Amino acid sequence: MKKIAFKTLGCRLNQYETDALASRFHTGSYQIVDFNDEADIYIVNTCTVTNQSDQKSRQTISQARKKKEDALVVVTGCMANNYKESLLESKAIDFVVDNERKASIYGIVEKHFRGEVADPEGFDKDVFNYEAAYKTFHTRSMIKIQDGCDNFCTFCIIPKVRGRATSRPAEEIYANIREVIQYGFKEIVLTGVNIGRYEDGDTDFEKLVENILEIPGDFRLRISSIEPDGFTHRFFELFAHPKLTPHLHLCLQSGAESVLLKMRRMYTAKQFRQMAEKLRSMYPDFNLTTDIIVGFPAESEAEFEQSVTMAKELSFSHIHTFKYSVRSGTRAERMSEQIGEKVKNQRSEVIRKLSEENKRNYYKSMVGKKQRMLVERIGGDGVARGYGENYIPIRLKAAGLVKNQFIDVEITGLHEAKELEVTAKVI
Amino acid sequence: MQNDNIHEIISIRHLTDSTYIIQMSRRGLKFRAGQHILLGKAGSIHNREYSVYSGEKDSYFEVLIKEVDDGMVSKQLKKLKAGDKVQIEGPLGFFTIEPELIEKEKFLFVATGTGIAPFHSFSRSYPEIDFLLLHGVRNANESYEKNHYPKERHILCTSGDKKGDFHGRVTEYIMKNRVSPDTHCYLCGNFNMIHEVFDLLEQQGVPPEQVHAEVYF
């Protein structure tokens, strides 16, 4: 039996696609091994959203080749789209497979081992041709509903590497979700590049979520990462449904109106604030997390401070900070007043510290409150870990806990670990 | 076989020394007024974003281009002639009007320079639309086919010469002529204008969800 190892860089969408591929290889009698172990095949699912992602992707490819000289190294993901020509020239790589043909990697590998010519370009393009993943690296089951983006934010390379926005047929999504519920998954995470723009005939994003929530079964649904544009009141009301988790990763990028305009975002800072305040007024414990870009071209100290102020006031419990990096072919590449690395590092550090502070405050505010924990793993010490519906990491020591089960708990305090967690007791 | 995104130039109309309109074959490409395309010379890897200037029902595509001093694409395109080929990606963007609003609401369009392009497309696509267009330019010779709009709906704001309908910037016009809060406002043009008009409209009570912007760099 051939051994195969996977490494995913970047976003949840990449993780979903890796999970689906891993599941396919597992069905096909391949043995999935850790990426640090020796394998016959290494699949590197790359990211190119920043310079740092490029570097990490290149390092990972190099690591794969060093693990075993005669292994088959397959590189896919956004970097494969963005730097296809240079990657094709690399001796460390056997196949470069673009995002549109990522779902065909199983076929490409099989063909290769049958001794046939396996040119990835000979396989059909289909960004949704993934089977429901029963064998994944996660307890939560990600479901791809959409790919690509038409927003063309001035800093973003994604429309170039993921293409124009396209939505998966709604019926396929419902079928996919029913399948993973049957496999036993209890948390569904919707994923895509710009899922708020989902559209399949009359089914928009809100209608899709409504319909998913009506699917029978003991599961909960997480929207996760979404762009803050085009929400109607209906969107906010959806969170009253007990199956929809009260958490959103709502991408702010900047708290300064002027920077948002230069980024060509589809909302103003004021509109963002209204959305966040509306969510909190309707659902007081609602957990908001976000992305902030620091060092966008010409971002002044005052503009950066507006991001800091907004992040404090809206109490994001986690902020993913990106240092702006020039992406070739984007509009921001041609903008003047690029910001130096030193300033970007300083700003990034300010946001990182604020994120830690916000997280601690949010977790403290949840002490004494109830959560429905989904047990993800149980350590040798008998301590179970998992997440509540508000996406808080919970540690729980109790008898009779079983992995992948919901358990009602009360948050009792904070626990200092590598990452801050909360402690809980069964109720 | 012709590539799907290759279009032939029908004509080029020069409006000023630096501003021109390229008319291209439509080839059935659908778009919504207000959207933009990525346009470049056929075979070139370089392209730029331009709002569509023509109407949804026109048999051709038009874009309004200002030659940029240190620009690459706007200079390349200016040299093309009828019969030459260009390539188009798109249409793209969400700077559009919801169909159900067109006949029953009133609109304010605020443009600077070639930012008038999507408003030309709106007015051509939706002849029944109730709008007022403020067009801010330095001199009146940059009014870009002013005669295409009903006179009472077009106000040329000139900050340089005094040959426009209003001497001053569009922001000054808005300060002196309050905008009714029930107006749907569309802003297109340079960053500073949009930034300032956003604030002015807010001060005058226009809800933010009724303000839409397309920034030109």
Image (tube, coloured by chain):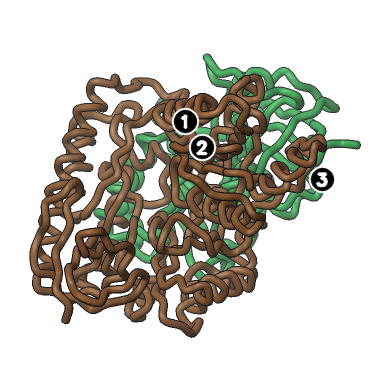
Chain colours: A brown, B green
Residue B139 x/y as whole percent: 48, 27
Instruction: Tell me the residue that label 2 is attached to.
Output: A46
Q: What residue occupies the far top of the structure in this picture?
A: B70
Residue density around tag 2, few if under 14, some if 14–19, many if 20 or more, within 10 Å: many
Query: Looking at numbered disc 3 in the image, what kind of residue is underneath it?
Result: Arg
**Vertical position of residue A319 compared to residue B78: above or below:** below
Q: Which residue corresponds to the image point at 42% horizontal and 63% vertical from the top-left?
A: A140
Q: Which of A13 and B83 is in front in this view?
A: A13
* One can see residue B24 in this view: no
Instruction: Tell me the residue that label 1 is attached to.
Output: A60
**Chain letter for mark 1:** A
Question: Which image quarter: residue B206?
Answer: bottom left
Q: Which of B188 and A185 is in front in this view?
A: A185
Instruction: Tell me the residue that label 3 is attached to.
Output: B27
Query: Looking at numbered disc 2 in the image, what kind of residue is underneath it?
Result: Thr
Q: Do the residues labelled 1 and 2 touch (CB within 8 Å)?
A: yes
Left or right, A129 with reference to A355: right
Question: Mark 1 or mark 2: which comes first in sequence?
Answer: 2
Please give the label number shown on residue A378: none
Q: Which of A251 and A101 is in front in this view?
A: A101
